[in-house]
Image (cartoon, grey):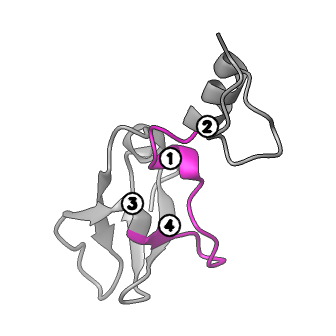
Amino acid sequence: MSAKTMLFKDVSTSHLIEVADIVTLSNPYELTVVGRYLWGEEVQDPEVFDKTELRFLSGEELPRCWHDSRYRDREVRRLRCGTRAAEDGDYYQGA
């Protein structure tokens, strides 16, 4: 494993996955990332993984901003439309 890779756990198999493309990993417009399973003595072939199926080694989910391009829509709508912060974001007071 080189210094510019990250390790993750596949939710469905609990196998380790090495991801080298950190830019794609953190890009919310990319729903998948290319990685390699880490098992055996030989380097495995690259595969495409759904980012929502990856977890940090601690079991923690990836940040929502890494796989959901609309993660701030509710906040932006609240600020633009004057919705109440404590409500769900469907309340509209604006012009």
Report helix, strand or loop for mark 2: helix
- Is residue 12 depicted above or below 95 in this figure? below
Task: Please give the name of the residue rendered at 37% of the width and 45% of the height, measured from the top-left corner.
Answer: 21
Q: Please state the horizontal and vertical placement of residue 67, each as a whole percent of the image.
A: 44, 49
Residue 51 in percent (x, y) is at 39, 60
Comes first in the chain, label 3 or label 4:
4
- Cα separation, mark 2 vs mark 4, equals 31 Å
Residue 19, image quadrant: bottom left
Q: Residue at x 56, y 52 (%)?
A: 64
Helix, strand or loop status at disc 1 = helix
**How crowded is the residue under tag 3: few (<14 C-alpha within 10 Å), some, or many (20+)?**
many
User: Marks 2 and 1: CB-CB under 8 Å?
Assistant: no
User: Which circle's residue, 3 or 1, is located before the other in the chain?
Assistant: 3
In the picture, measured across the screen, residue 71 lies left or right of residue 24, that is: right
Residue at 36% in and 78% down: 38
Magenta region's main secondary structure? loop
Magenta stretch: give its range. 53-71
Nearest to N terminus: mark 2 or mark 4: 4
Q: Classify the position of the C terminus by image quarter.
A: top right
Q: Which circle marks residue 66 in the picture? A: 1
Amino acid type at image mark 3? Lys
Whether tag 3 and tag 1 are in contact, CB under 8 A, the answer is: yes
Gap in Å between the C-alphas at discs 2 and 3? 22 Å
- Mark 1 or mark 4: name the one nearer the start of the chain: 4
Residue 8 % position (x, y):
49, 70
Whole-angstrom CA distance, mark 3 to mark 4, is 13 Å
Q: Are marks 2 and 3 in contact (CB under 8 Å)?
A: no
| Of pointers 2 and 3, the one earlier in the residue sequence | 3
From the image, tell me which residue sits under label 4. 7
Position in image of residue 32 (x %, y %):
29, 54
